[in-house]
Amino acid sequence: MSYIINKGINRPIEFKGLKAQYIGYLGGGLVFLLVLFAILYLIGLAVYLCILIILALGSALFYKVFALSHKYGEHGLMKRNARTYLPTYLKFKTRSIFYEKR
């Protein structure tokens, strides 16, 4: 009897080179571009101009999301953003918090 081994356990979700949350970022960006196209069309801009704007912004979106995915990997962007919430230093006026309370 032979068993098939699943070698994808505990590996991040990956789609065409995009890892983890970057798939969501790209999907959200594409939805935003779709809504932007509808708004530009309803305003009365020429269709060719709308398409040109959306293609330019879409290309920039793909380039930026893929660049972030390759630069930071699965968790790197979240770690970089979390670093901004860390204080630069801690200041204590008393040492009482370090003493054991009984």
Image (cartoon, grey):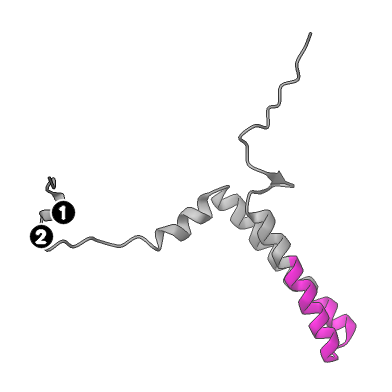
Which residue in the structure is indicated by mark 2?
Answer: 94
> Marks 2 and 1: in contact by CB < 8 Å?
yes
- Report the magenta residues as a range: 30-53
Q: Secondary structure at mark 2?
A: loop
Q: Position of residue 53 (x, y in %)?
A: 78, 78
Residue pushed farthest front?
Answer: 102
Q: In this image, 45 relative to 11: left or right? A: right
Residue 53 visible to the viewer: no
How many neighbours does mark 2 have within 10 angstroms: few (below 14), some (14-19), or many (20 or more)? few
Q: Position of residue 79 (x, y in %)?
A: 47, 53
Which residue in the structure is indicated by mark 1?
Answer: 97
Placement of the C terminus among the 4 image quadrants = top left
The three-letter code of the residue at mark 1 reads Ile
Residue pushed farthest right?
Answer: 47
On whether residue 34 falls in the magenta region, the answer is: yes
Q: Secondary structure at mark 1?
A: helix
